[in-house]
Image (cartoon, rainbow, N blue to C red):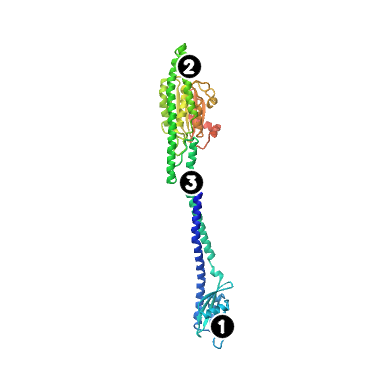
Amino acid sequence: MRWALVKVALAVTVMVVVAFAVPLGLVIKEMARDRAFTNAERQAAAIGTSLSITTDRAQLDRAVASTQAGAAGHLAVHIPASAGGAPMEIGTGRAAAKDLATVQRVPRASTAEVPGGYALLQPTAISTGQIAIVEVYVPEGEVTNGLATAWLILAGVGVALVVGSVAVADRLGVRMVQPAQRLAHAAHDLGEGRLGARVPEDGPAELKSAAVAFNSMADQVVRLLANERELAADLSHRLRTPLTVLRLNAASLGDGPAAEQTRAAVEQLEREVDTIIRTAREAKPQTQATGPGAGCDASEVVRERMEFWSALAEDEGRKVRLAGVERPVRIPVARPELVAALDALLGNVFRHTPEGTAFSVDVHNGDDAVILLVSDAGPGIADPEAAMARGNSGARDGSTGLGLDIVRRVAESTGGDVRIGRSVLGGTEVRVWIGLDGRRGPAEGRGRGRGHRMRRRRRAQH
């Protein structure tokens, strides 16, 4: 579309320039010619006044020499022979004899071509009643004087008009094509599962309306998927609490076939729940928001999820500390992604630490990153690198091996990373680094140097 507009503008502008420039160039040529011959007529008129008074050669010589054309040798006077006299020629004549005879026979001013230019032949009646001819030579250079400059200016104006119209058409094409290209790319990304694709709502009215409709559709798709994941998470959390109670009660049943069957049924139910969660997580599409205004408030999400988990923490006698969520902290992560990552971290605390184990959640807001710390007072993780491997449950009951991998992918999508270490509470500390500038990729985030890690650690401790 862009090049089509440029071609149309180019064709129309060239036709307009040709339609106006060619006639205007011919008019300029005629004006230059008229200017040269009008000046020659004035020179001839000045000599005509002297001829009407006298035919004395000496006086006519002085009159011819006093004119601009006569001084330049471009003026001549042809006086026919009078009774008993000879014809008189004053100045340098260039016109052919037949042209002079024609003007004397038909006393009317005319123009004759001569070598190097033109000759203006002006008939003038003298005192003897005869017709004298004043010849003014007009060189070719005077006829075309200034013509080349005028045509050059005219051509420059035409070229400027063509270039200007092409530039305007190109800008107009870009303004129309870019929104369409962004919409096409966003639709392609959406088709590949990147549900965070959005397009700016600008451009022509029609494309702006299409962008609004596309963004609304994408938001609706994200909301539907988020609702499904929230439903799965809610069901899993609701199931795990009674499953924990059932497991504890089954453990207290003692020995016997009924007790063993009950414990086996509880374990099988837990495995089925883990399988459902694993299947849902592995099929999860990319939903990180990337459009204008994308992201969420980390403080709000942390407060909401801690309120959700606080009931279970109270039942198990766990002390909970929450810090850094007093004011909004905006991060470039879609709300459903942060909810899933936080639920995975808190779920690990409840599943892999004894009841009564304290834990804390801290949010640190820096200039270029936000750090989310989840710490507990449990036994810790013996092999942090193995724990970060996707699908590695470590032979732990109630583990799908996907929780920390989910957290890692969320962090790396912003250029950050995830580190596992020893917390001040004595157990595990999971530090999630979420980049705010978006200029680093996941690989770079994982390969940052020791100096960067030290700055992160100091910022996190602060």
Q: Would you say 421 lies left or right of 239 here?
A: right
| Residue kind at label 2, given as amino acid type | Ala
Q: Name the amino acid, label 3.
A: Val
Q: Which mark is residue 208?
A: none
Q: What residue sits right under mark 3 in the picture? A: 177
Q: Position of residue 204 (x, y in %)?
A: 44, 46
Mark 3 closeness class: few <14, some 14–19, many ≥20 residues within 10 Å: some
* Distance (Cα) linking label 1 and label 2: 144 Å
Q: Residues within 10 Å of mark 1 (few under 14, many from 20)?
A: some
User: Quick one: SS at disc 2?
Assistant: helix
Residue 360, picture quadrant: top left
Q: Which residue is mark 2?
A: 264
Q: What x and y, as percent, mark residue 151?
A: 53, 63
- Distance (Cα) linking label 3 and label 1: 81 Å
Residue situated in front as seen by the camera: 456 or 205? 205
Q: Position of residue 56 (x, y in %)?
A: 53, 84
Q: Residue at x 48, y 42 (%)?
A: 182
Task: Describe the element under mark 3 as helix, strand or loop.
Answer: helix
Q: Which disc, if any, is residue 88? A: 1
